[in-house]
Every structure is written in structure tokens, then in C-alpha cells.
Image: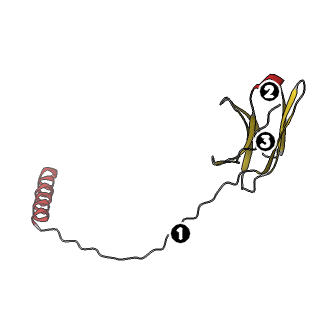
Amino acid sequence: MNGIRRGLILVGLTVAVVLGASVPASATFSEAVAVKTTISTTTVAAPGSVVGKLTCGTPSTMSATWVKSTSARVSGYLVSVYFSDGFVQTVQLGATATSWSAAIDPYYVTAYSIQYSLTTQTNYGWSKESPRTVAFQC
């Protein structure tokens, strides 16, 4: 009895597949929708009013002050000291910093001039560097 049922089901499914395959497919779809997409981007502001200073002596002192960036989600600042021979010294600072200073051997600021810049860093990976200051040398 089960064998006959299975056979009839198999024959019925086979006939359905053959008939379904022989009927041509017909499908039409058409719809037009107008959508206006607006993408806004944000910018990162560099620190403002960057002022560099070099105090000559033994040891000499490099320093810089700045106004915090107006960008959202600032995670820190990167102070870059550019030496005239191409060397760049960087110092990572926190998000609330507005000044930095460090001692340096007088030889390096006598033999080379230096310039400062500040880079705003955000917690979403964007950054913006300020223009370099004027050059300083002892």
C-alpha cells in the first residue's frame, strides 16, 4: 500500500515538474521612485592659535601653547617638532592639553632650526594638522 502511494506521488510530482517547465515564464515589474539623498560630512578643526617658543640656555627649552580644537570627540593632540635636517620629533598628549614643553640639548637648536605644529586627533580616526610655526634657532 505504501509502495503504491509513493509511486503515485512520484508520478504526480514528475508530471507537475514537466508541465511547470514547459510553461514559459512571464514576469514584469516596473516602478519608479525618486529619492533625494543628502550626505553630510564633518570636518576636523586643527588646534587654533599655535604659538611656539624656544628658550636658549643649558639646557634649552622647547614649548608650545594652543587653543583646543572645536571638533567633537577629540581624543588627543600630537605635538610635532620639525628640525631643519628633516628629523621630526612627536609627543602624544591628552585631549585636555593646551601646552607642552621639553628640555633639549643646546647643540640641536644651535645646529638646526625648529618649527612646531599641532595635530588634533579624534576617537573616530580623523585628524587635522595645524600650519607650522615660524622657525626658531639659538
Numbered tag placed on residue 38 in the rendering: 1
Dot 2 amino acid type: Thr
Vertical order, 40 against 118 (above or below): below
Residue 86 coordinates in the image, percent (x, y)? 65, 31
Looking at the image, is mark 1 or mark 3 earlier in the sequence? 1
Can you tell which quarter of the image residue 32 is in?
bottom left
Q: CA distance from mark 3 to mark 2?
A: 30 Å
Q: Secondary structure at mark 3?
A: loop
> Disc 1 residue type?
Thr
As helix, strand or loop, the secondary structure at mark 2 comes to helix
User: Foreground residue, 8 or 111?
Assistant: 111
First in residue order: circle 2 vs circle 1: 1
- Tell me which corner region of the image, top left, top right, bottom left or bottom right, holds residue 27: bottom left
Q: Would residue 105 be visible to someone looking at this image?
A: no
Q: Give the x, y percent position of residue 82.
A: 71, 35
Q: Amino acid type of disc 3?
A: Gly
Q: Name above or below for residue 135 compared with residue 50.
A: above
**Above or below for 70 versus 60:** below
Q: Residue at x 45, y 74 (%)?
A: 35
- The residue mark sitting in front, 3 or 2, is 2
Q: Are marks 3 and 2 in contact (CB under 8 Å)?
A: no
Numbered marks: total: 3
Helix, strand or loop at mark 1 = loop
- Percent of width and height locating residue 5: 15, 55
What whole-number distance in Å separates the C-alpha atoms at marks 1 and 3? 34 Å
Crowd band around label 2 with a 10 angstrom C-alpha radius: few (<14), some (14–19), many (20+): some
Q: Residues within 10 Å of mark 3 (few under 14, many from 20)?
A: few
Q: Earlier in the sequence, mark 3 or mark 2?
A: 3
Separation of residues labelled 2 and 1 (CA atoms): 54 Å
Which quadrant, please, contains the C terminus? top right
Q: Which residue is mark 3?
A: 94
